[in-house]
């Protein structure tokens, strides 16, 4: 391996996007309550990542949370949705085991309705 090959290879590795995923369970969003929610969610041991392809049509008070088998769990709220498009990351609340959940939710806390859900596997 010559120096040029090493530099090119090193640049390719360091140029990877920060929200590329790869260490958790992935799922694709579907909209709920007449909202359009698309893209990929990743549930990992340290939290949830919404990947670069995430889009949401907007609503008041959207939050990120977890659920299981179609049931949202309010104790898993991770905070407000940071952006309606693109990548973002959310830390799990203390004491929450991600292995106990199989869904990532976008939830409207103000009106207590689901806005989108991604089943992760």
Image: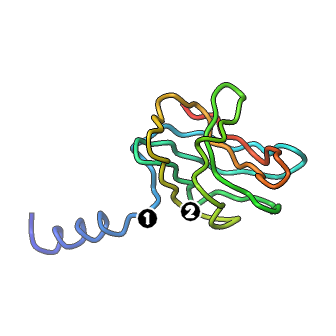
Q: Residues within 10 Å of mark 1 (few under 14, many from 20)?
A: few
Q: Position of residue 2 (x, y in %)?
A: 9, 69
Secondary structure, mark 1, is loop
Q: Report the quarter where the C terminus lies.
A: top right
Which quarter of the picture shows residue 15?
bottom left
Asked which colour scheme the image uses, the reply is rainbow
Q: Residues within 10 Å of mark 2 (few under 14, many from 20)?
A: many
Q: Residue at x 64, y 51 (%)?
A: 64
Which quarter of the picture shows residue 101?
top right
Q: Position of residue 37 (x, y in %)?
A: 76, 51
**Tag 1 near tag 2, CB within 8 Å:** yes
In the picture provided, is 85 more to the left or to the right than 10? right
Up-down relation of residue 43 to residue 83 (above or below): above
Q: Position of residue 27 (x, y in %)?
A: 60, 39
Towards the viewer: 110 or 103: 110
Up-down relation of residue 104 to residue 59 (above or below): above
Q: Position of residue 67 (x, y in %)?
A: 64, 34
Residue on which the image places disc 1: 17
In the picture provided, is 6 more to the left or to the right than 64? left
For this orientation, the residue located farthest to the right is: 34
Nearer the viewer's eye, disc 1 or disc 2? 2
In the picture provided, is 28 more to the left or to the right than 32? left
Residue on which the image places disc 2: 87
Up-down relation of residue 79 to residue 103 (above or below): below
Q: Residue at x 67, y 25 (%)?
A: 69
């Amino acid at each position: 391996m010559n120096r040029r090959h090493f530099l090119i290879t090193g640049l390719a590795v360091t140029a990877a996007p920060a929200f590329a995923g790869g260490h958790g369970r992935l799922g694709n969003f579907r909209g709920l309550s007449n909202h359009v929610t698309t893209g990929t969610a990743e549930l990992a041991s340290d939290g949830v990542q919404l990947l670069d392809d995430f889009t949401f049509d907007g609503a008041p008070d959207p939050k990120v949370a977890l659920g299981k088998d179609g049931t949202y769990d309010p104790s898993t709220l991770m905070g407000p949705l940071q952006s309606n498009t693109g990548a973002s990351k959310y830390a799990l609340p203390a004491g929450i085991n991600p292995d106990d959940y199989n869904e990532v939710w976008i939830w409207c806390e103000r009106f207590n309705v689901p806005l989108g859900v991604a089943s992760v596997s």
